[in-house]
């Protein structure tokens, strides 16, 4: 099974197909398996690279909470692209994975051919809502420590996901899910690459952020998937795949 070694932490990834690279980043408490409906259909047209964020799925769960950070995760993403021989890639991220894709764009702008921001948000300009988000991350971590995997519930985004350690997920909530500042949301007008912003039409918590990103990113296309919630790629895979394929196939080779 393919892993990269990041200073003793093994990060798991899978590749399918050849051609232009698309890095698929899952959301919090999910795994790379969430992208199976896309890999099955689009894997013959692109090099799809799906991976497990540290603390998730088949990736390692370091004991040291300091090993979980946005900076470390962005570095993991770059290392995976290096391992796959991809100098540039489309970054497609769901939920927390979308935020991480925007973080990656800030650090490695030259490596981003396009963005797919799905069921996600760009963070917060003001301290108060950001503090509320971080309190949610802390509550999530605490529930995992108290209840184990039972704290994850049965949402579609975690269905079929298998993790190694509740503590790994708790550490990821505190170190990767938490947000520090407004630099991501303030970076939106600087994005020049083609960007697909999409969400399930019933995913109410993320509809406002979807609209906001579609306005602030100059070269953005917005798509809402009817009759779908936060896991539109699983709930309505045919509609989701059609929107994603239409976007990817318009991009020049890279």
Image: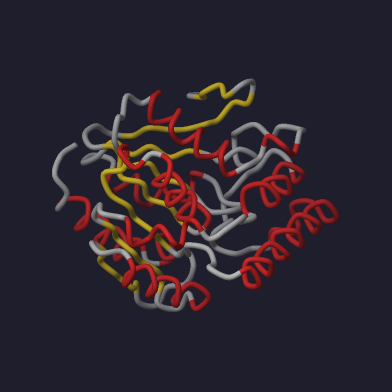
Note whether 71 is above or below 220 in the view shown.
above
User: Horizontal placement of 139 versus 177: left or right?
Assistant: right
User: Horizontal placement of 151 versus 85: left or right?
Assistant: right
Residue 54 on image: x %, y %: 61, 38
Note whether 242 is above or below 167 in the view shown.
below
Residue 50 on image: x %, y %: 43, 40
Q: Which color scheme did the rendering employ for the protein?
A: secondary structure
Q: Residue at x 53, y 75 (%)?
A: 205
Residue toward you, 49 or 176: 176
Q: Residue at x 25, y 64 (%)?
A: 218
Which quarter of the rendering shows the C terminus? top left
Q: Residue at x 46, y 36 (%)?
A: 77
Residue toward you, 221 or 225: 221
Q: Residue at x 59, y 48 (%)?
A: 161
Note whether 19 is above or below 207 in the view shown.
above
Residue toward you, 24 or 236: 24
Residue 249 on image: x %, y %: 16, 50
User: Horizontal placement of 169 versus 11: left or right?
Assistant: right
Q: How many marks can you see?
A: 0
Give the image quarter of residue 124.
bottom right
Residue 98 on image: x %, y %: 45, 55
Q: Residue furthest right?
A: 146
């Amino acid at each position: 099974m393919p892993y990269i070694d990041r200073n003793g932490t093994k990060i798991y990834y899978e590749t399918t197909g050849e051609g232009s690279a698309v890095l698929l980043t899952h959301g919090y408490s999910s795994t790379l398996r969430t992208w199976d409906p896309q890999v099955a259909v689009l894997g013959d047209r692109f090099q799809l690279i799906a991976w497990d964020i540290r603390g998730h799925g088949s990736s390692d769960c370091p004991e040291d909470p300091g090993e979980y950070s946005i900076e470390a995760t962005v570095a993991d993403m770059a290392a995976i692209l290096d391992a796959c021989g991809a100098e540039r890639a489309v970054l497609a991220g769901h939920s927390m994975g979308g935020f991480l894709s925007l973080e990656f764009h800030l650090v490695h702008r030259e490596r981003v051919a396009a963005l797919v921001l799905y069921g996600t948000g760009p963070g917060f300009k003001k301290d108060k809502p950001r503090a509320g988000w971080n309190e949610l991350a802390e509550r999530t971590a605490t529930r995992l420590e108290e209840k184990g995997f039972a704290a994850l519930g049965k949402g579609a985004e975690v269905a079929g996901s298998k993790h190694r350690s509740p503590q790994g997920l708790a550490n990821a909530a505190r170190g990767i899910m938490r947000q520090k500042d407004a630099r991501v949301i303030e970076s939106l007008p600087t994005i020049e690459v083609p960007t697909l912003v999409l969400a399930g039409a019933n995913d109410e918590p993320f509809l406002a952020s979807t609209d906001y990103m579609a306005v602030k990113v100059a070269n953005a296309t917005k798509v809402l998937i009817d009759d779908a919630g936060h896991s539109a790629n699983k709930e309505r895979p045919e509609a989701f795949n059609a929107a994603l394929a239409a976007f990817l196939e318009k991009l020049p080779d890279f």
